[in-house]
Amino acid sequence: MGFRPMISSLLRSKTGPILVALQIAVTLAIVVNALFIVVQRSEKMNRDPGIDVDNVIVTYVRGFGEDFDVVNSITNDLDLIKSIPGVVTASVLNQVPLSGSGSGTGLRTVPDETIDSVNTARYRWDENGLDALGVRLSRGRNFLPAEVDVVKPTIDSGVPASVLVTQALADDLYGDEDALGQTVYWGDMTQSTIVGIIDHMHGSWVDWSKFNNSVIQPGIEADTTNKYVTRVEPGMRDELMPIIEQKLGESNRSRVIKSVRSLEEIAARSYRPDFAMVTILSIVMALLIGLTALVIVGLASFHVTQRTKQIGTRRALGATRMHIVIQFMLENWLITTAGAALGAILTFGVAYWLEVSYSLTRLDWRYLPAGIAALWILSSLAAMAPARRAASVPPAVATRSV
Amino acid sequence: MFKYHVKLALKSMRRNPIMTTLMVAAIAVGIGVSMTTLTIYYLMSGNPIPAKSDVLFAVTMDSWDPLRPFDDDFPERAPHQVTYHDAERLLSLAKGKRQVAMFESSLIVEPAGNGVLPFEASARVASSDFFPMFDVPFAYGSGWDTAADAAAEPVVVLTKALNERLFGGTDSVGSRLTLSGIRFQIVGVIDTWEPTPRFYDPIESGFEEVNDMFIPYSLTRAMELQSSGSDWGWKAEDINSFEQWLNSESVWIQYFVELDSPGDADKYLAHLDAYVNDQKRLGRFERPLNNNIYDVMEWMEYHEVVATDTRVLVGLSFMFLIVCLISTIALLLTKFVGKKAEISLRRALGASRQVIFNQQIVEVAVIGFSGGLIGLLLSVFGLQGIKFLYESPPGLARLDWVMTFTAIGIAVTSGVIAGLYPAWRVCQIPPAAQLKAQ
């Protein structure tokens, strides 16, 4: 059996099939592009932060009143937090990674203002900072307690002698050269020595292209708002959060406990637009696929009903049930394939529009064949029931009401 | 006749319940999804202060690093904020009809009475013109006057929400309130005010909530207020005191000016140029002269307040609506073909093509209208969902009358467009031809 009878029957009532093909084309274009965005955003959200996000609690406190001594308060608070059973260690950070707020700077390998600096997030923490975040030092050494000074934000306290950098920042600065032990220059051309390298750690701004670049200075920043980062034993986090809040609240009344949050929640907040995009696009894709499948079923059923007599005649002339099923499935396949061909062009059209107008990442072409294959399967499944019903038309129908 | 059409339409819809449901559902889902995204887009891109958006201008001056531009991606742009001392000098020159220098900070509120714990609240630190310039509505009292600006008086204007929290919503004007250790006098309480986007400060995001309270800009020095917004610096400066910080080249103050008419922009720019040229003589502003003012809508565009994601979603969801319409056309065609016998009969009994056509259009419009209504309902849910997903402020996910009528309009129009071809096809059925086969 060839394609001729199918094509001729398709051509006889062409509007229906053309519409279905058109619908399949637009569906393909939307689904492929939406899926690509969804996968990209999911990958972005699932990047390894290099931090023990699940077991870290972040506490924001702010002191007030004439008698408030910020340095004392920080020391006492950290001692108090560390004394709570289940707490691994705690540190005070100038900024919280993954939080969307932070401070950045530029570093150079030579003291020359005319050279563009390498941009990086800038952190300050004490000798417990690494452990409090669960960040791994791959080479070199941690800060020594003697290197940790108290720093007030508007007071220039001079630049520390030792810094840690992430591997990504080391690569940006020194390329293939070993960064350990090298000198880096700050904006005012003061210099620091790299004493340790962090294998991998995410910075503050999840959308920034230099998200992996961080430099860490030793110190305790006595800011208006102090950010305590506490790492706890696995599984203890939710239990310890209210305890920390309560104990800190009781210990000193001239402090406002602004919030006690898990780092997981803080990170989720930063990724909220991506999560929203993934959710919305997933719903749209599900609705779209469902609708298209229903329409294929509806139209295929209608064609079967309309052609009952033709099917009966073919059956009477010796076509087996299998032949009828194959006829309808092939017919459906032809429509789907025509739609997919048009859809391929449309898909790249939409991808081009997204790339040029909104500078989205260029579509990975492999999504298209995958999308077409999925469409073939979907449309075959949708056409299965109507085709089976067509096959059950008895040959005798042909002889009736002629 | 119209009533008869509607009656027939309902009858015909009841005859094919699955088909009808599918068609209504297709339109409803299409409208629901596209109206949800369109509403967000409409609210994001809306004009937050239509009466004055063309006479309010954000002021930028290029005081940045002589070696490189402020923003590598837009090298022609000056920094979007100004230095503290430039803002102070522009304020004292007062060349606009009104002008405001401002930034965001936060203070500790120490409520009177025992048992109420102190808490942190955000504050907009602004000069007195803020209120008349931006048409801020007052529930009680008013803003402060220029005398309070000049004397750096500790006066405060509360939002309705903070007044509710502290004073149970009563008229608190004249009461005292301790903020970060200083006794303030409450001079006003603003009424509900949700500028969407928050045009006067779109820097972090265009859709932040209005700050809890407002205090005079001139208190900055006395209270050593720090910005909780962003500050940007380029120059390595020795900063060992708050005064040195205020005199630094860091940009962290937002500056707006109101002019009498949009035509005065050039005159104001000339004033800015004169100011900057004066400063150049003092060795500042080493970059080429690059001052600019942006009216409200230009400022929204500058900060890209409409998120790229939103634009992409609007585009994709309208393609989705197209798919829904194609489905509806295909289903209608299918259905009409099934009605050949009936149409033939009506034609044979004397109904003209026009009547048959009208009949079909009414049926399609009924489907479009019901689909539109259900779609509208879906978009209400959709907006709730978006509100939840983005944790957006109250102004950003509400359906107003414009959008409601747009939704119904789009639904009926698209229903009719989808129905035109099938209806035309049905009219072509010759009278009696179908009757023969019976």
Image: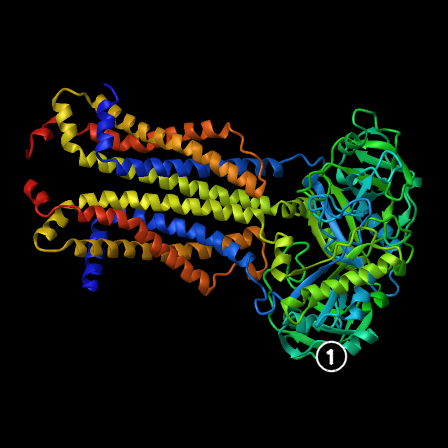
Residue A345 image position (x, y, % from top left): 44, 33
Residue B231 image position (x, y, % from top left): 77, 54
Q: Is residue A162 visible?
A: yes
Residue A296 image position (x, y, % from top left): 31, 37
Task: Count how many numbered circles sit on residues in the image.
Answer: 1
Residue A356 image position (x, y, % from top left): 56, 40
**Horizontal arrangement in the rendering, residue A271 relative to residue B11 (left or right):** right
Q: Is residue A89 visible?
A: no
**Horizontal arrangement in the rendering, residue A302 relative to residue B328 (left or right):** left
Q: Is residue A136 above or below residue B73?
A: above
Query: Which residue is labeled 1 in the image?
Result: B175
**Horizontal arrangement in the rendering, residue B35 relative to residue A180 (left or right):** left
> Residue at image x 8%, y 51%?
B348
Q: Is residue B32 above or below residue B184?
A: above
Q: Is residue B420 above or below residue A309?
A: below
In depth, the one of B267 and A303 nearer the eye is B267
Which class describes the residues within 10 Å of circle 1: few (<14), some (14-19), or many (20+)?
A: few
